[in-house]
Amino acid sequence: MSAKRVTSQDVAIAAGVSRTTVSMVLNNVPGIQISEETRQRVFDVARELGYVPEAAAQALVSRRSQSIGFVMARQVHHVITDAFLNSLIAGSIQTVHDHNLRLIVEMIDPEHQQEAYLRLARARRIDGMILAGPRFDDQGLKVIEEEGFPVVIIGHIDQSNLCSVDVDNCAAAREAVAHLIQLGHKRIACVTNASPIYMAPAMRLRGYRQALETAGLAFDQNLVRFGDYDLESGYIQMKSLLDDGLSFTAVFVSSDVVALGAKAAIYQRGLRIPQDIALVGFDDVPMARYMEPPLTTIRVPAVQMGSAACRLLIDLITKGDVAKRKITLETELIVRESCGAKRVRTTNQSIPNQ
Amino acid sequence: MSAKRVTSQDVAIAAGVSRTTVSMVLNNVPGIQISEETRQRVFDVARELGYVPEAAAQALVSRRSQSIGFVMARQVHHVITDAFLNSLIAGSIQTVHDHNLRLIVEMIDPEHQQEAYLRLARARRIDGMILAGPRFDDQGLKVIEEEGFPVVIIGHIDQSNLCSVDVDNCAAAREAVAHLIQLGHKRIACVTNASPIYMAPAMRLRGYRQALETAGLAFDQNLVRFGDYDLESGYIQMKSLLDDGLSFTAVFVSSDVVALGAKAAIYQRGLRIPQDIALVGFDDVPMARYMEPPLTTIRVPAVQMGSAACRLLIDLITKGDVAKRKITLETELIVRESCGAKRVRTTNQSIPNQ
DNA sequence: TTGTATGCGTTATCAT
DNA sequence: ATGATAACGCATACAA
């Protein structure tokens, strides 16, 4: 706190060279020739003195903050519950570290502060930005795109040339629902992971509908409910589905977290899974495998998405542009026991090694 | 990207005043007298030009980065699974925002990079740091403490005067286990949330032991297993407990996440909860309430802990010191159904409103 | 091979 | 009430 800062000047003096030399050596400037001896001396002195370049000074002159923003357009209680975000962030931090960068994590209320993250960019606090889960109508995004600020969105926005990484939510949902249909279900309800003003929920709903139509099954709006990212919404929507006395034998919940809430409502009603109601989720969050019964779901490579988004962004920042602006990662249907697969209960079967 | 930056100089010229005036006005310097007219003009021009002060320049001269670090000493897969961290981070971001600061989130491998966060501090990239879940033997922490860098740890370290916010893990664990004992259980197993080289797991284990001793029950080392933060570890440890053919009627798992894994092992063995084995968790993570059966657990105010840690840190940074260096938040035993309370299955009972 | 001079955008200390 | 000037710590083009 009090001890005065060690500057490159101090290192220079102690090593008997100029500040320039210190800078050159420490930054390992390529085209430069400096005697191995001096080079070593500078290194030694720097380490001895505990010299660490001041980030602000470097940023000011290099016009690079060496940190990137990760903004999630979610309210607090969503961030708390959403297990998917963890993985996105973990993947991002990891990748960012490999490139000697840092991650500034922002949480923006999607209702009110749509342009809040503009300040981050304008203040040059970040060199680029990852935006998780955008809305259709995000205004700030337009501005930022026009200004050419490096952005990668995790998710998808129609008619936009922004860089993005996503999965094919529609196809994946189709696969999940087709699985149900193949098992003989004809009345299949749906609880979305969130409001369809967000892209992913909208696409997953579309996939549900397409699967129905492909199989010649009627789409019934009454069988569709909108979740809101968290457990409670799943519980509430499932309960409402049950309360309405509609007949259905399966339900597609387009988020594992929401599905966990839905499951509670089903059990509370005294119904069994999968015997009375088959359940299929989406995301393959870590806990899905440990649910009762283990949840059949769509695996979304969350960590890899965070990681891929970072790599894309870093290319965008350093190279100015990038060959492939839209990356789509693969999903996979993971069949477990919530749709009626046989339940095995022998001692030696191990869940972790699946 | 390409459009040249708007500086305070530009604003000054456009408004027909000096840079000093611009700075004064925009920063609302108290003791200064500037005509309401110029003041307004500066504001207007600044907004019109879209002027945003450059963070690096401000940081360089003010010696404040206006951002704080949140470092979690965990490996990637822990961050992915640990629902508790979400809440800590959410609480922190929220509070930090209220003070116009940002959060740089770091993930440090506790094995290798113990001193990695030193660089953040030394480069003045952050003004202070929150450290979640430290180990006994963290070396970097010592250094940082000596240098007087503002740190708040979430958790606790013995014989340290560092600022911290925590709960009384030992007392809470005692309460949880006492609950089991009161219900008539005499053989109670324990799966910790993590290795006892971390403080919280160690304290929770101690509480378990104390409760046993208080009740005159024997402590049996064979009944104790160490989890590792995630679901899988809970599954594995519970399975090993079951495989060893030990007799016990209840298990205290000192983390809800780990407990969820343990639950899966119990069910897989064909045992019922709570009829065959009573289960009590720790943390009261959001999903605890939605587990099957709803999990009896200790509520830990995670969001508030993140929030309190930030407030403490901000005081430390701005005021240099703080009156109360150690904050202990209250926990609460939440009795649900995993220990044998009656199960109600009427239509109108709603979980969310508990 | 090494050193000198200049600028990055702000804030703050002085004069005026 | 306002304006010139000096730091802040670093990188770099250019000179030696």
Image (cartoon, coloured by chain):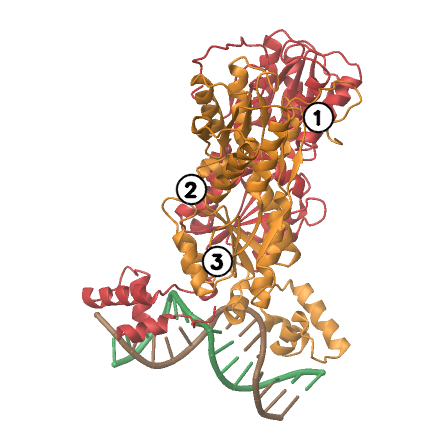
Chain colours: A orange, B red, C green, D brown
Same chain for marks 1 and 3? yes
Circle 3 sits in a helix, a strand or a loop, which is it?
loop
Q: Quadrant of the C terminus of chain A?
A: top right
- Against A332, residue A191 (above or below) is above
Q: Amino acid at mark 3?
A: Ser
- Which of pointers 1 and 3 indicates the residue nearer the eye? 1
Q: Residue furthest top?
A: B184
Q: Which residue is mark 2?
A: A197
Q: Which residue is mark 1?
A: B235
Q: Describe residue B47's horizontal placement relative to residue B133 as left or right.
A: left
Would you say the residues marked 1 and 3 are in contact, meaning their CB atoms lie under 8 Å apart? no
Report the front residue among B68 and A80.
A80
- Subunit under mark 1: B
Q: Residue at x 63, y 79 (%)?
A: A18
For the residues tagged 1 and 2, is the chain the same? no
Q: Residue B299 bears which disc, if any?
A: none
The chain carrying label 2 is A
Vertical relation: A172 (above or below) A59: above
Asked if one can make out residue A195 in the rendered structure from this viewpoint, the answer is yes
